[in-house]
Image (spheres, rainbow, N blue to C red):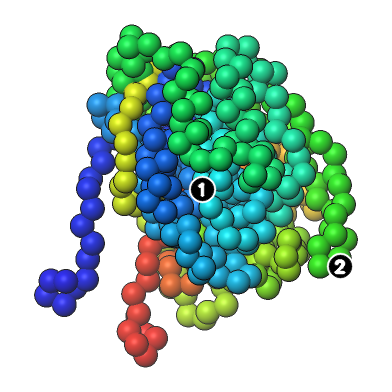
Amino acid sequence: QAGGMLYIAMKYVEGRALDEILEAQGPLAIPTVLAVMRAMTGALAYAHREGIVHRDIKGANILVEKGGRVLVSDFGIARGSEDKTLTATGAVIGTPTFMSPEQCSGEKVGPQSDQYSMGILLFQMLTGEVPFDADSVMGILHHHFFTPLPDVRGVRDDVPQALVDVVLRATAKKPDDRFASTDDMLHAIEAIPFSDQDRRQTRETLSRLAEGEKLPLVRTRSLPPLGTPREFTVSGETVKVQAPAKHSRWPIWAGAIGGLAVAAAAGVWSGVIPLGGGEPAPTEPAASVLTPTLAVEDPLAAAGESTAVGAQVPASEEPTAAALDEEPAATEEPAVQPTPARTTAPPPAAVQRPAATTPTASEPTGIGYLRVRTQPTTALILVDGDSVGVGVLFNTVVPAGTRQIRATARGYAPYDTTVVVGPDATVNLGIITLRITLRTQGGAP
């Protein structure tokens, strides 16, 4: 505390988060994957020996310094493995695309939950995609519970069988089927051949990636579809979950457009998900999920929001670093949609979806896809005035043509922009950071 101001000082990590690297590069070469896994697993094995469970392992929390050092950061929701208050009753904490089944259901989690998240991240480094993707949080959680992991060898042939075995064991649905300890997982990874030359080359490769260099792409095949819709029962109510029609793939024919702040390839949504209400969806406000239901507090419940346009900055996760050393190999850069210019005024109050109207000759027809992540993660995202999600959209289907995008959250200035979505094209807005709105105690600006 200084002069009445509370602050926290943290180490500055000069480099990039792993999710930014994966967004730009797609799959990584096997030696690079091994270098990251050795460092990350070693760091978490140490934390687990000290009784600490991270609970939010994902690419955004793995930092790569210039120089090639890998650090595990952001222990903001970490807890002691023996802490009986690890998860509040009726709350799920974490990032859905990386959460273990037991974490999805709000159960007390241990080191095996972090192992599962590392397995998902390992799959993403090998294939360029997270294995379980859906149009809703409930769909993602459903896959964690019921859907087998896609075959890594079906995507690329150069993955050693020993590494495939690590992926499969770490992502087992039951914690007891994973590694007995994270030290055992580390030993399994360290048993995979990794020469001194690999160590030197991967350190150089990771250093170049941390500095934002564009390396040759590692070419892979597409992931198979995740499967057909299925019904399951939640709190006595039958719920049907629709899996995505197909897995998105990184284009392997173009480079990224410079200067674009990109979101995690997984489209992450982290934070506390309280139970009881519903996540806003494109046409209806919500869905119950798991035990008893998952929901997100409506960010628009408070009145008196400022109409100033929120600033957009390339936000990175605030790191509180705890780490170990290790090393890197080569890859390339996918095409990313440019960030459209922001408008200086909010969109019309009631813009209708073009899907319900007859398109003009100048407007493209068909559907496209939208990716965006917001800071804060509680921001409501609207397309043409309709709420379509909270915190993150990942390959969300929208009508092709000119779309009005708005993000708004209580206590923040709303963000507005206009984008043009091409047929079968993906528009990636990256990370949108809303500006905090300061108010006096009486509520006046």
| Viewport quadrant of the C terminus | bottom left
Locate residue 389, reporting x and y percent.
63, 57
- SS under mark 2: loop
Q: In the shown orientation, is residue 369 left or right of residue 126?
A: right
x 80%, y 50%: residue: 241
Label for residue 111? 1
Q: Amino acid at mark 1?
A: Pro
Quadrant in which residue 78 is drawn: bottom left
Q: Residues within 10 Å of mark 1 (few under 14, many from 20)?
A: many
Quadrant in which residue 280 is drawn: bottom right
Locate residue 386, reporting x and y percent.
67, 61
User: Is 82 in front, or is 21?
Assistant: 82
Of labels 1 and 2, the one closer to you: 1
Q: Amino acid at mark 2?
A: Gly
x 49%, y 17%: residue: 192
Q: Earlier in the sequence, mark 1 or mark 2?
A: 1
Residue linked to disc 2? 236
Relative to 193, does residue 24 appear above or below in the rendering? below
Q: Is residue 2 visible?
A: yes
| Viewport quadrant of the N terminus | bottom left
Quadrant in which residue 18 is drawn: top left
Q: Residues within 10 Å of mark 2 (few under 14, many from 20)?
A: few
